[in-house]
């Protein structure tokens, strides 16, 4: 039984905490009342997201078995090492999706639609004839859409009446693209053989370390642009947040250069104590700037020209 549970990747459920920023943004902008209903919606929403994600993980492992055998660590995945029965695997695939859909509908119809969007992106990413994971650059863009979807999931836990600002959705999406590009760079670097890398992931036949790093830089800069638009538009004091936020991208770059980097396995990032401390500082700074008015920032930013009187 354990060999079937493994393909659900319960150890990856920690990644569903990426819904939390969406929850925080909705909470800060809409200022909802904290009550039992809100807490229940968050718990149900998190469970539903874990189940939908597990459905995507199941089909990913099942359809990737012929390629994962070329990866240094993924060759030990359950589908590669064990003789799993297709009927059970597909029952788990549709069963987790169905249960996740039922739970998500209990939150709200809008929340259900967003969760189904997450499930559909799993189909687009993994299943032929599209199988976007085999197409260079589109693999990163399509996988990182899940980041934007998770932001929406967190947002719609709080409200089903308002849509979040588009700038933060795009910024969060591109931040996810940065993470995925760095993940691929770390994998490509670890495999250290373009031929084997191409057997493991078809898109790697068209990548190089330079192209992956350049694409990651592009995604990072684009993400910073859109996140900056959102932050400055909604609270000018958050301009002080941006230099520290940019430092987060640099820190993640640094992690990717490590041997057996945690960038390859985002679910293991909590072991990077320095990164976790940095994120905690970012959260504290964000909350402080959301509550403390700094008049000089408004003066300097809102005045296009400052007259100098001698």
Image (cartoon, rainbow, N blue to C red):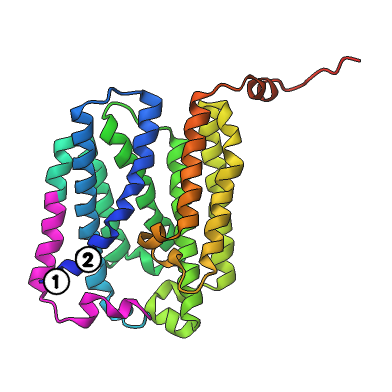
Q: Position of residue 223 (x, y in %)?
A: 52, 46
Quadrant of the image for the N terminus? Answer: bottom left
Residue found at x 55% / y 35%: 229
Residue found at x 24% / y 38%: 42
Residue position marked by numbered label 2 in the rendering: 59
Q: Position of residue 185 (x, y in %)?
A: 50, 69
Residue found at x 42% / y 41%: 169
User: Which of the two marks, 1 or 2, is nearer to us in this view?
Assistant: 1
Q: Position of residue 62 (x, y in %)?
A: 22, 72
The reply to whether residue 249 is in sight is yes
Tell me where residue 112 sits by quadrant.
top left
Label 1 sits on a secondary structure element that is: helix
In the image as oriented, which residue stretches furthest toward the right? 310
* Residue bounds of the magenta highlight: 72-99
Q: Is residue 191 left or right of residue 33?
A: right
- SS assignment for the magenta stretch, majority: helix
Q: Is residue 149 left or right of residue 49?
A: right
Q: 287 or 105: nearer the eye? A: 287
Q: Residues within 10 Å of mark 1 (few under 14, many from 20)?
A: few
Label 2 sits on a secondary structure element that is: helix
The reply to whether residue 218 is in sight is no
Residue position marked by numbered label 1 in the rendering: 2
Q: Any magenta on residue 284?
A: no
Q: Any magenta on residue 83?
A: yes
Q: Position of residue 61 (x, y in %)?
A: 25, 70
């Amino acid at each position: 039984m354990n060999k079937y549970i493994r393909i659900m990747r319960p150890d990856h459920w920690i990644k569903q905490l990426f819904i939390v920023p969406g929850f925080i943004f909705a909470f800060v902008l809409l200022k909802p009342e904290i009550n039992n209903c809100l807490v229940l919606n968050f718990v149900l929403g998190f469970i539903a997201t874990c189940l939908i994600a597990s459905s995507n993980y199941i089909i990913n492992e099942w359809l990737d078995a012929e390629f994962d055998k070329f990866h240094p660590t993924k060759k030990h995945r359950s589908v590669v090492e064990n003789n799993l029965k297709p009927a059970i695997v597909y029952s788990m695939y549709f069963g987790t999706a169905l249960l996740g859909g039922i739970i998500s509908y209990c939150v709200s119809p809008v929340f259900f639609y967003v969760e189904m969007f997450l499930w559909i992106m799993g189909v687009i990413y993994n299943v032929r004839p599209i199988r976007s994971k085999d197409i260079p650059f589109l693999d990163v863009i399509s996988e990182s859409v899940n980041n934007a979807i998770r932001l929406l999931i967190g947002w719609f836990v709080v409200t089903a009446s308002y849509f979040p600002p588009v700038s933060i959705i795009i910024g969060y999406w591109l931040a996810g693209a940065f993470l995925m590009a760095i993940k691929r760079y770390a994998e490509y670097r670890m495999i250290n053989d373009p031929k084997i890398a191409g057997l493991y992931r078809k898109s790697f036949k068209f990548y190089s370390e330079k192209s992956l790093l350049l694409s990651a830089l592009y995604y990072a800069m684009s993400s910073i642009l859109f996140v900056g638009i959102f932050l400055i538009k909604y609270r000018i004091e958050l301009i002080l947040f941006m230099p520290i936020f940019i430092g987060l991208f640099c820190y993640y770059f640094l992690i990717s250069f490590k041997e057996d980097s945690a960038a390859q396995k985002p679910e293991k990032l909590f072991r990077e104590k320095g990164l976790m401390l940095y994120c905690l500082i970012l959260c504290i700074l964000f909350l402080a700037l959301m509550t403390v008015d700094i008049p000089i920032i408004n003066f300097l930013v809102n005045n296009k020209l400052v007259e100098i009187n001698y």
